[in-house]
Amino acid sequence: MPTQQQGVLELPGFKPVPWIVDRPDGPSHKLAVLLAHGAGGDASSGNLPTIAAAVAEVAPCLRFTARGGSLQHRINVTKALLAAAPTLLGLQHVERWVLAGHSMGARGAASIAGEQPAAVPVAACLLLSYPLHPPGKPSDLRDALLHQLRVPTLLVRGSKDAFSTQALWDAALQGMHAGWRQVTVEGGDHGLKVSGQDSAQRSTAALHSVCTEVQQFVREAAQRAQEQRAGEQRQRQQQQAAAGASQKEEWQAAAAKAAAGKKRGRAPAAKEAASKPKKAGKKQRRS
């Protein structure tokens, strides 16, 4: 059963950052998820606790609160937190991250995940209600971050999200270079809530479906990361074996050269000995 830890982290240059880690039982995990909240929210806003609990059945999930500031400020806090997480938050075994977020948090996740060269070892990206444009301003597109992604991406969106007009959203997806798949909550708004008759039940059912998709996505990311580690290990072993074989060949060549040199050194000495006349022995007198 997943367990939860909470605390406040002092990061140089930033206000104290409250954090929450939901983690599964069992052996140490090599992959973890960072889940960022939207503008004006915190680590426990909206559906984040439910999604974090679902993720924690598969991999550790780190949430944090970073209120206020610009998108760049959020990105800077996120990077500082990721750098500190291995030693300060008990995530020292984590080698790769799934960067996730809701709304503004999704923009921050996409920004970091799309950096080249990568500032963080990112295995995948999970974008919840990515704000493609401000409400009522479809001309102010924010699709560039989506198009720079090069890691597998899961996009979760409500069909009635005012931050992403359907036609513009479809066009933005066509411009993506990363492998992606989409989960659409029919009738869902920016918070993935469904309005109308039986809205509570429908919203709960929709969130359950989203959590199932997220779990599967994280499992796949963990599996790919494991296969990548195995491939890297095989490559290192092959390189070590090749280096060992090359060194052995060098040793053998050096030994053969040394042996040949000794043989050439003995040959003149033997020839000289053969060319010297033998001393005649004394003849015995006969009486």
Image (tube, grey):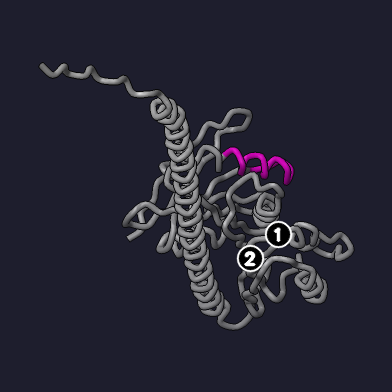
- Membership of 285 in magenta stretch: no
- 235 horizontally vs 282: left or right: right
Q: From the viewer's perspective, is 109 left or right of 267?
A: right
Residue 8 lies, in percent from the top left, at 48, 37
Q: Position of residue 165 (x, y in %)?
A: 79, 72
Does residue 6 appear in this view?
no
Q: Nearer the viewer, residue 267 or 26?
A: 267
**Residue at 60% over, 62% down:** 126
Q: Residue at x 66, y 53 (%)?
A: 113
Indicate whether residue 77 is drawn in magenta: yes
Q: Residue 245 or 114: which is nearer the viewer?
A: 245
Residue 83 placement, left or right of 104: left
Count of labels in the image: 2
x%, y% of residue 219?
A: 47, 67
Q: Amino acid at mark 2?
A: Thr
Q: Secondary structure at mark 2?
A: strand
- Please report the residue visible at 37 percent of the width from the left and 52 percent of the height from the top: 28
In the image, farthest residue toward the bottom: 197
Location of residue 59 with respect to 251 vertically, above or below: below
Tell me the number on the disc at residue 149.
Answer: 1
Could you tell me how far apart the alpha carbons at marks 2 and 1 are, in whole angstroms? Answer: 8 Å
The answer to which quarter of the image holds residue 102 is: bottom right
Q: Residue drawn 44% across and 58% down?
A: 59
Circle 1: residue type: Leu
From this viewpoint, is residue 142 visible?
yes
The dot on residue 153 is 2
Q: Compared to 140, does 67 lie above or below?
A: above
CB within 8 Å, label 2 to label 1: yes
Q: Nearer the viewer, residue 144 or 128?
A: 144
How many C-alpha atoms fall within 10 Å of the one at disc 1: few (<14), some, or many (≥20)? Answer: many
Magenta region, residue range: 67-80
Q: Residue furthest right?
A: 139
